[in-house]
Image (cartoon, helix red, strand yellow):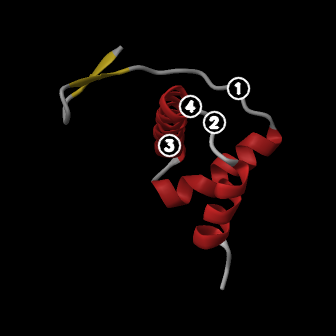
Amino acid sequence: MESDADTGATAETATVRLDDEDRALLDELASEFGGRSAAIKQGLVMLAEEHRRRRALADFMAEWVAESGPPDPDGVAAMHERHFSQR
C-alpha cells in the first residue's frame, strides 16, 4: 500500500482482468472520467451507491409489508401510470 499525500488516505493497487469487450468499455469511459483508474473508481462508487439504494428500498418494503401488508398491485399500477407514464 502507498500513502496518498493529497488526501492522507491509503491507496491500494488491484489487478483487474478484462476481456476485449471490457477494455473497450473502459477506454470509452476513461476520457470522460479522467483516465482508466478514475473510471474504475467511479464505477465502484456508482455500484456501491446503487447497492445502498437497493438495500434501503428492500428494508423500506419489508417494513411496509410488516406494518401494512403487501402493496396492492392495482394501486402500484395506478401510481406508476401517474408518475412514470409519458404524457
Q: Are marks 1 and 2 in contact (CB under 8 Å)?
A: no
* Left or right for 30, reference 63: right
- Name above or below for residue 58 compared with residue 46: above
Q: Residues within 10 Å of mark 1 (few under 14, many from 20)?
A: few
Which residue carries the number 2 mark?
A: 70
The CA distance from mark 3 to mark 2 is 30 Å
Point out the frontmost of discs 3 and 4. 4
Q: Are marks 4 and 1 in contact (CB under 8 Å)?
A: no
Q: Are marks 4 and 2 in contact (CB under 8 Å)?
A: yes
What is the number of the mark on residue 17?
Answer: 1
Which residue carries the number 3 mark?
A: 46
What's the residue at 66%, 64% (across, down)?
Answer: 78
Q: Quadrant of the N terminus?
A: top left
The CA distance from mark 1 to mark 2 is 43 Å
The CA distance from mark 3 to mark 1 is 20 Å
- Marked residue nearer the N-terminal end (4 or 1): 1
- Name above or below for residue 40 compared with residue 87: above
Q: Are marks 3 and 4 in contact (CB under 8 Å)?
A: no
Is residue 32 or residue 71 the one in the foreground?
71
Q: Quadrant of the C terminus?
A: bottom right
Point out the frontmost of discs 3 and 1. 3
Q: Residues within 10 Å of mark 4 (few under 14, many from 20)?
A: few
- Which residue type carries mark 4? Val
